Amino acid sequence: MGPHAAGLEGVGLPAALPRWQVRLERTWGVSLRPPPSRLELELARCVDEWDAGLARIEYAEVTAEDRATFLEQVVCWQVRRALGAGRFDLALALTRLAPHRIAQLAERLERRPLLRVIPGRAASLFATPPIDRPDR
């Protein structure tokens, strides 16, 4: 019985916790979930460095290409640092995540709201309404 047996669970969603685990967590007040792995923590720290660096270069004269180049250079530096430390898993994760992050950055910058004009209504949007003047 239940949603799992009926095939009603969401595709790609994490499975619901077992009831015994939820009950123990609520009763004891502790989390029974494993802590994040070392790779996840290091990857999160690297992404925080990316965001901090992008925030530091947030000026009007900095273009989207400049931001993408900055991010590529930061990733190259972090990959070299990870390889030097023997963290091949971190270097691979960074090289997998960086293109997606650069694409998100470019997409976010290109989606700035622009003036939208509906064809056929352009004249009515910019035309001034006639002013009713009483005859003198």
Image: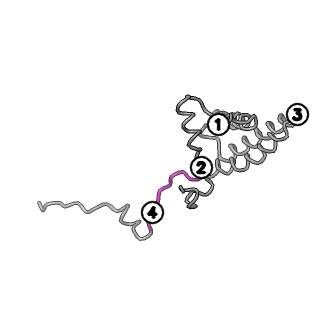
Q: Residues within 10 Å of mark 3 (few under 14, many from 20)?
A: few
Write down the residue under mark 4: 117
> Which of 124 and 15 lies nearest the eye of the viewer?
15
Write down the residue under mark 2: 108
In-image side of 118 versus 47 (left or right): left
Mark nearer the N terminus (1 vs 3): 1
**Which of pointers 2 and 1 indicates the residue nearer the eye?**
1
* Kind of residue sitting beneath label 1: Arg
Q: Residues within 10 Å of mark 2 (few under 14, many from 20)?
A: few
In-image side of 10 versus 128 (left or right): right
Q: CA distance from mark 1 to mark 3?
A: 32 Å
* Kind of residue sitting beneath label 2: Arg
Q: How is the image coloured?
A: one colour
Mark nearer the N terminus (3 vs 2): 3
**Which of pointers 2 and 4 indicates the residue nearer the eye?**
2
| Residue 116 among magenta residues | yes
**Which of pointers 4 and 3 indicates the residue nearer the eye?**
3
Write down the residue under mark 3: 84
